[in-house]
């Protein structure tokens, strides 16, 4: 069964600090996909990144970086030099490959989210 | 922008009344989903669809039904609303289904439902 755990319910940092949001996942599949979404105070869900299980390269996009480690089943998200605009709820999610008899991946299973508050 | 709209965006209703939420997409995506978001639970899957008239249950499907008579519309119905169904409801589509290493879900703006 799939499971995603975001142990940090709320984090508060001062602007310009670095912050890491943790995500631990469980799956029996060897092929799976990990995602991060951002939900700002306005409420919409914004896709940030998708990672495939066969690609353990870390990814950097501006101030955002992601560390994928299969050995610890973790997919952590770091914001460098945080800004007030980064204040949001961040969700980690997991999807598995369906296999050759069905197309597409399984629906997403989400963690409960981490609320990040960046204080000016 | 994945071209997803949800209607209504806000609704207040009374316990026991039927409610239908609509998700409309303009880009001919085959796969569509309904999730609900509640404090302390994140997002949980209610129902999903792989195509017209092809639907399946998710984790929290009790009390909900869905229909998909056209590719562009995916309807979620609460047959008899209860206070426990007060929530924010999100519709989503999958881009690039079948291209497993590119498939990504994009979400609509959400519908905030209050059942009194």
Image (cartoon, coloured by chain):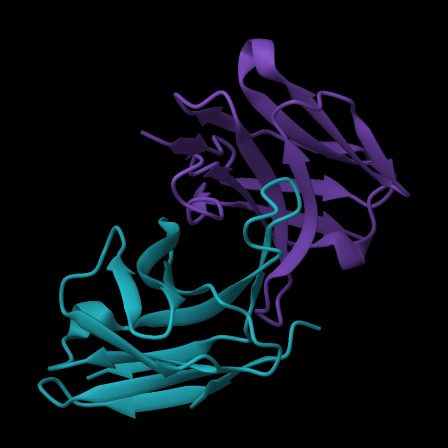
Chain colours: A purple, B cyan
The image shows residue B18 at horizontal and vertical percentages of 16, 88
Between B66 and A43, the one lying in front of the other is B66
Q: Quadrant of residue A20?
A: top right
Residue placed furthest toward the right: A62
Between B105 and B99, the one lying in front of the other is B99
B88 displayed left or right of B24? left
* Position of A88 relative to A19 (above/below): below
- The N terminus of chain B lies in quadrant: bottom right
Residue at image coords 23%, 87%: B19
* Position of B109 relative to B35 (above/below): below
Between B23 and B94, the one lying in front of the other is B94
Q: Quadrant of residue B97?
A: bottom right
Between B97 and B44, the one lying in front of the other is B97
The image shows residue A105 at horizontal and vertical percentages of 48, 44
Residue at image coords 42%, 45%: A106
Residue at image coords 35%, 89%: B11
The image shows residue A55 at horizontal and vertical percentages of 71, 24
Residue placed furthest toward the front: A101
Q: Quadrant of residue A74?
A: top right
């Amino acid at each position: 069964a799939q499971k995603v755990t975001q142990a940090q319910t709320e984090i508060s940092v001062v602007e310009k600090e670095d912050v890491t949001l943790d995500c631990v996942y469980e799956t029996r599949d060897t092929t799976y996909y990990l995602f991060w979404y951002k939900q700002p105070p306005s409420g919409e869900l914004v896709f940030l990144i998708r990672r495939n299980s066969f690609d353990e390269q870390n990814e950097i996009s501006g101030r955002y970086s992601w560390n994928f480690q299969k050995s610890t089943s973790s997919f952590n998200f770091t914001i460098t030099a945080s800004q007030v605009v980064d204040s949001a709820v961040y969700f980690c999610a997991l999807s598995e490959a369906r296999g050759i008899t069905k197309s597409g991946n399984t629906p997403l299973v989400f963690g409960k989210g981490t609320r990040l508050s960046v204080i000016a | 922008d994945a071209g997803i709209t949800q209607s209504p965006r806000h609704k207040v209703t009374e316990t026991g009344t039927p409610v239908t939420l609509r998700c409309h997409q303009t880009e001919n995506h085959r796969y569509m989903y309904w999730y609900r978001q509640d404090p302390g639970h994140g997002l949980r899957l209610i129902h999903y669809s792989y195509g017209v008239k092809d639907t399946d249950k998710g984790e929290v499907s009790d009390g909900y039904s869905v229909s998909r008579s056209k590719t562009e519309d995916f309807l979620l119905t609460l047959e008899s609303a209860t206070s426990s169904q007060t929530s924010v409801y999100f519709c989503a589509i999958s881009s690039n289904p079948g291209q497993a290493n590119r498939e990504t879900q994009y979400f609509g703006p959400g519908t905030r439902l209050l059942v009194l």
